[in-house]
Image: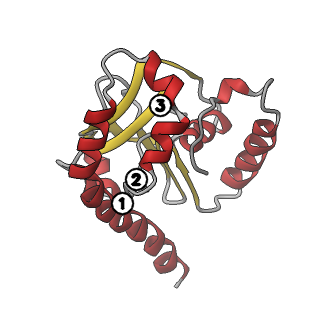
């Protein structure tokens, strides 16, 4: 499950979110491999019974994350010391039975795992930089409403960090997926 410019609490306006939540509830209960990024992570948290709510401020731009010991010992270790793209205004409580992997100052619960089968990340492990210009256009109103965000800084930082982040993201996701193949053998 990937992200989008809406939030979990937007169910009344976007009823398909209820279907997404039911699908995630069944999938997680069946211990099927599940990956959630951004809105996908928030939906996973909600499907696991956690509260999803507005963060103290929007987290938009490139910045480093703090990995817990569990985060440093798993696939997200590829992001140690490397800026990642944040683009969210909501956050969530850590779902019961999950393990915290990553935090930031704005959103202490940035990433979690549920055993080996589920990985949820608010930050964007999948970003490659090529598509960010469409995000900048598509989210122009949101960007304009957030004090301190500069389009030129976002573009400059994307130029500096996106390639490295994409490589780390590919390594992270490959490692996470290989874990399932090894478990199946």
Residue farthest toward the left in the current orientation of the protein = 81
Query: Disc 1 and disc 2: Cα gap in Å?
Result: 5 Å
Pointer 1 with pointer 3, Cβ within 8 A = no
Pointer 2 with pointer 3, Cβ within 8 A = no
Query: In screen coordinates, is 71 left or right of 35?
Result: left
Does 74 appear above or below 106? below
Q: Which mark is residue 150?
A: none
Residue 107 in percent (x, y) is at 38, 26
Q: Secondary structure at mark 1?
A: helix
Q: Number of callouts in the render?
A: 3
Task: Of the two numbered discs 2 and 3 on the same chain, state the one appearing first in sequence.
Answer: 3
Q: Which residue is mark 2?
A: 125
Q: Residue, x 33% and y 68% (percent of image)?
A: 171
Pointer 1 with pointer 2, Cβ within 8 A = yes
Q: Residue, x 36% and y 14% (percent of image)?
A: 147
Residue 83 in percent (x, y) is at 24, 45
Q: Residue, x 74% and y 44% (percent of image)?
A: 20
Residue 50 in percent (x, y) is at 59, 29
Mark 1 neighbour class, 10 Å CA radius: few under 14, some 14 to 19, many 20 or more: many
Q: Which residue is mark 1?
A: 169
Q: Quadrant of residue 25?
A: top right
Q: Residue, x 75% and y 37% (percent of image)?
A: 17
From the viewer's side, name the closer residue of 156 and 108. Answer: 156
Q: Quadrant of residue 4?
A: top right
Q: Which mark is residue 88?
A: 3
Q: Secondary structure at mark 2?
A: loop
Query: In screen coordinates, is 166 left or right of 72?
Result: right
Residue 157 in percent (x, y) is at 24, 43
Q: Secondary structure at mark 3?
A: strand
């Amino acid at each position: 499950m990937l992200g989008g410019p809406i939030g979990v609490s937007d169910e009344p306006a976007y009823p398909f979110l209820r279907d997404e939540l039911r699908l995630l509830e069944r999938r997680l209960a069946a211990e099927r491999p599940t990956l959630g990024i951004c809105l996908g992570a928030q939906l996973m948290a909600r499907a696991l019974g956690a509260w999803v709510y507005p963060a103290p401020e929007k987290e938009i731009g490139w910045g480093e994350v703090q990995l817990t010991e569990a985060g440093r010992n798993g696939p997200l270790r590829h992001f140690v010391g490397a800026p990642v793209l944040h683009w969210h205004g909501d956050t969530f409580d850590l779902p019961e039975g999950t393990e915290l992997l990553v935090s930031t100052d704005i959103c202490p619960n940035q990433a979690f795992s549920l055993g080996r089968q589920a990985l949820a990340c608010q930050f964007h492990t999948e970003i490659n930089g090529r598509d960010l210009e469409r995000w900048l256009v598509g989210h122009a109103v949101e960007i304009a409403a957030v004090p301190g965000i500069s389009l030129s800084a976002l573009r400059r930082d994307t130029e500096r960090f996106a390639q490295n982040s994409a490589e780390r993201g590919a390594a992270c996701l490959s490692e996470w997926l290989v874990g399932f193949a090894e478990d199946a053998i």
